[in-house]
Image: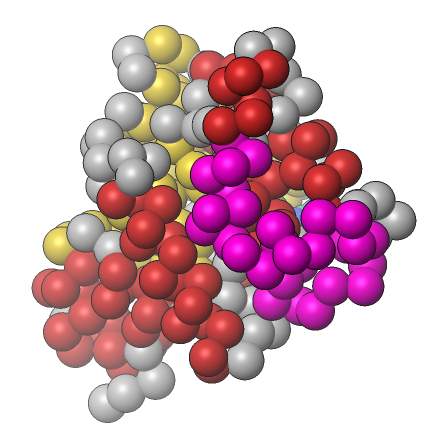
Amino acid sequence: MLTVKNLNTHYGNIHALKGVDLEVRQGEIVTLIGSNGAGKSTTLSTVTGLLKPTRGEITFNGVSIAGKPPSEIVRMGISLSPEGREVFPALTVEENLSLGAFTRKDKAAVKRSYDRVYDLFPRLSERKKQTAGTLSGGEQQMLAIGRSLMAEPQLLMLDEPSLGLAPKLVMMIFDLIVSINKQGTTILLVEQNANMALSIAHRGYVLETGKVILTDDAKALATNEAVRRAYLGQV
Ligand code: ATP
């Protein structure tokens, strides 16, 4: 579904991605793990068109998308739930969700997406008219994921969905990611919480200083000694 080859991205003089190769197949949950500054968020931002690659290829369902504008990439079926939630605090839950559907014209289909999101996140359904700034951290995270689902993406990319959440909520968010995947949405998940990410993913990539240093089935990565030492906090 998504193929990334030799992806290079710069921030001015900073060479953040130095030839990233990865693949996400239809139906999978794929996780990108790595330390702070490894290039995980930069990879997602480049795939969604927020950053332009300086070299390399990105194809989605066989079509080249590298350098296309973000709105066109959303329309083609890729949606990003960004790190740090980034909901609009002064807008209500419903208004925030409606922004996720801005590229869509079929009102009946958009209505089905609201139903899907409210079904997945009953807490949002109970708070439709509440302003997003007054939601708890976990609820804001649900809203950010819900908003990206409003684009009905084929590929949902999640950047650090567990960041700053209490363990109970982390479990809940990860269960929801599995449910969303079972409904047919392919997932690319960026996480600091490598333990949790590998527990729900099919495959994973380990990123270090802008390069993929290892890729394998999630189970194999979770038991790989070097990965355990570096990213799972275990010896
Ligand atoms: P984290 O988990 O800390 O977000 P990450 O793996 O997502 O880490 P990136 O945010 O992709 O890492 O950062 C990759 C590299 O690019 C880092 O060296 C970072 O300092 C640099 N970088 C990221 N954003 C910018 C920016 N806006 N301007 C300059 N350099 C940046």
Residue 72 x %, y % = 57, 13
187 vs 43, nearest the viewer:
187
Which residue: 27% across, 24% down? 1
Residue 105 at least partly seen? yes
Looking at the image, what colour scheme do you see?
A: secondary structure
Residue 10 x %, y % = 60, 36
Residue 188 to residue 205: above or below: above
> Magenta span has 102?
no
Residue 25 to residue 171: above or below: above
Which residue: 47% across, 47% down? 119
Q: Is residue 66 left or right of residue 34?
A: right
Q: Is residue 92 left or right of residue 197?
A: right
Residue 82 x %, y % = 60, 47
Q: Would you say the magenta stretch is mainly helix, strand or loop?
A: helix
Residue 105 to residue 41: above or below: above
Which residue is the extreme one toward the bottom? 235
Q: Quadrant of the C terminus?
A: bottom left
Residue 108 x %, y % = 54, 17
Residue 78 at least partly seen? no
Q: Is residue 215 left or right of residue 37?
A: left
Which residue: 29% across, 12% down? 62
Q: Is residue 131 left or right of residue 40?
A: right
Residue 129 to residue 139: above or below: above
Which residue: 76% across, 37% down? 95
101 vs 50, nearest the viewer:
101
> Magenta span has 134?
yes
Residue stretch rendered in magenta on the structure: 113-140
Which residue is the extreme one toward the right? 90
